Amino acid sequence: MRIAVFSAKPYDQTFLTRANAANRHELSFFDARLTHDTAPLAKGFDGVCVFVNDHVDSAVLEQLHAGGTRLVALRSAGFNHVDLAAAERLGITVARVPAYSPHAVAEHAVALVLSLNRMTFRAYNRVREGNFALDGLLGFDLHGKTVGVIGTGHIGLIFADIMHGFGCRILAYDPQPNPQAKAFVEYVPLESLYAQADIISLHCPLTPDTDHLIDADAIALMKRGAMLINTGRGRVVDTSAVIAGLKSGHIGRLGLDVYEEEEQLFFEDLSHGIIEDDQFMRLTTFHNVLITGHQAFFTNEALTNIAETTLANVDAFECGSGTLHRVVYSKRV
Ligand code: NAI
C-alpha cells in the first residue's frame, strides 16, 4: 500500500524503513504534522500514518477521504486525537499500536519520581558550576511512602510493580479494576487516593471523564506537598490549577511528560525562537517542576514495536487477514 507518514522525524524513518525491509509498502515521509493545511499531501495515498499531535478531526478526515485514503494507522496507543465517529461515517479504518512498550512509559514515570525526589537535575547544574551546597536538594525515602496510581492498565500496573519494589504502599483508582493487578494493589475511591498518597501518577487515557481530572478541587483533596506525575495525556491536568497548587505549596513536586498545549511545542527544536506559551514558561520557572517533551515512549524497544505493529496493521488491512488493531467508535471512548 502507499502510505503517507506524517510528523516523520528521522527516527521514525529509520525504524519504519527497517520494519519495511521487504518493501511490502511504499512509504512517503513528511516532516509536517497532518493538519487541514497539509492533508492535501495525502491525496492518492491509500493510508496515512500519524502520531499524537497530528489532527485527525472531522474536517481532515473528509479531506483524506476525498483523496482516496481508507486507513489511518496511528503510531500511538492513545487515540483521543481522532474523531472516530467521523472516521466510521466515512468508512475510514483507524488502527493503533495498543501496547508497544508499557515498560518504557512506566520506567520514565519512575525516572521523573526519582529525579524530582532527589533533585538530580538541579544537582547536575550545580556541580558543573562548582556549587556543592546541598540546600534545596533534600529528598525523602521512597520506602514506606504511599503511591497513588490512577489508571491501572498496561502502564499503570508496571509502574505500581516498580514502586512496590521500592517498598511503597500502592493505592489505585480505576473504574475498571484490572484482574491482573497483584494483591498489593489496593483499589480505593479517588478521594481516598488523593487524601493518602505522597506520590500520584496518572496512567489513564484522555476521555471526557478524565479531561481536567486534576483540577483545583482534586488538588485541594491531596496531601500538602504531594508529588504529581503525568505521563498520560496533557489535558488530564488543568495547568492553571497546578500552577496555583505549586504557588501555594500544596503540590510539592511536579513531573510532566505531557502538557495540555504541547501540540505547539513538543517534538520541535524551538530553541532559537520565542516560546509564546506563558503558562508553559511559568511552569519552567519552578525549581520543583521537571518537564520532559513527551519522550516516555522513546526507547529502542518501543520504536521497534511501534514500527512493526504499524506495518502489521497495514498488512492486515490490505490482506483482510492477520491482526488488525482496529479502534472502533463507541459513544463514550
Ligand atoms: P490501557 O488502556 O492499558 O490502560 C488505561 C487504564 O485507564 C484502563 O485500565 C482504564 O480502565 C483506565 N481508566 C479509564 N478511565 C479512567 C478514569 N476515569 N480514571 C482512572 N482510570 C481510568 O492504557 P496504557 O497502555 O496503560 O496507557 C495509558 C495512557 O498512557 C494512554 O492512554 C496514553 O494516553 C498514555 N501514554 C503516554 C505515552 C507517553 O509517551 N507519554 C506513551 C503511551 C501511552
Image (cartoon, rainbow, N blue to C red):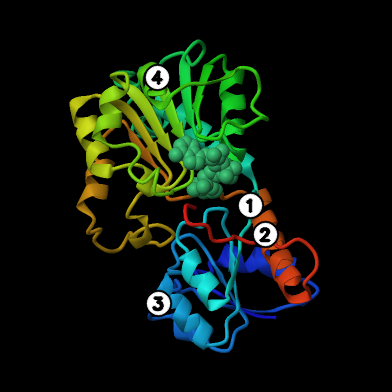
Q: Quick one: which residue is furthest to the top in this view? A: 144
Query: Foreground: 131 or 208?
Result: 208
Q: Gap in Å between the C-alphas at discs 1 and 2?
A: 7 Å
Badge 4 density bin: few <14, some 14–19, many ≥20, Cα 10 Å: some
Q: Tell me the amino acid under the disc marked 4.
A: Ser
Q: Is mark 1 within 8 Å of ligand 1?
A: yes
Identify the residue at horizontal 48%, vertical 56% (top origin).
Answer: 331
Residue 128, above or below 264? above
Query: Foreground: 315 or 19?
Result: 315
Can you tell which mark lies on residue 192? 4
Query: Foreground: 237 or 57?
Result: 57
Residue at the spot of label 2:
325
Which quadrant of the figure has residue 273?
bottom left
User: Mark 4 falls on what kind of element?
Assistant: helix
Please report whichever mark, 1 or 2, sits nearer to the chain's N-terminal start: 1
Q: Tell me the amino acid under the disc marked 3.
A: Ala
Q: Gap in Å between the C-alphas at discs 1 and 4?
A: 30 Å
Q: Where residue 260 appears, x then y in whole percent?
A: 34, 51
Please report whichever mark, 1 or 4, sits nearer to the chain's N-terminal start: 1
Give the quadrant of the N terminus.
bottom right
Q: Is mark 4 within 8 Å of ligand 1?
A: no
Identify the residue at horizontal 27%, vertical 43% (top origin).
Answer: 239
Residue at the spot of label 3:
59
Residue at the spot of label 1:
98
Badge 1 density bin: few <14, some 14–19, many ≥20, Cα 10 Å: some
Identify the residue at horizontal 22%, vertical 59% (top origin).
Answer: 276
- 135 lies left or right of 209: left
- 42 lies left or right of 208: right
Q: Tell me the amino acid under the disc marked 2.
A: His
Q: Where residue 287 appears, x then y in whole percent?
A: 28, 32
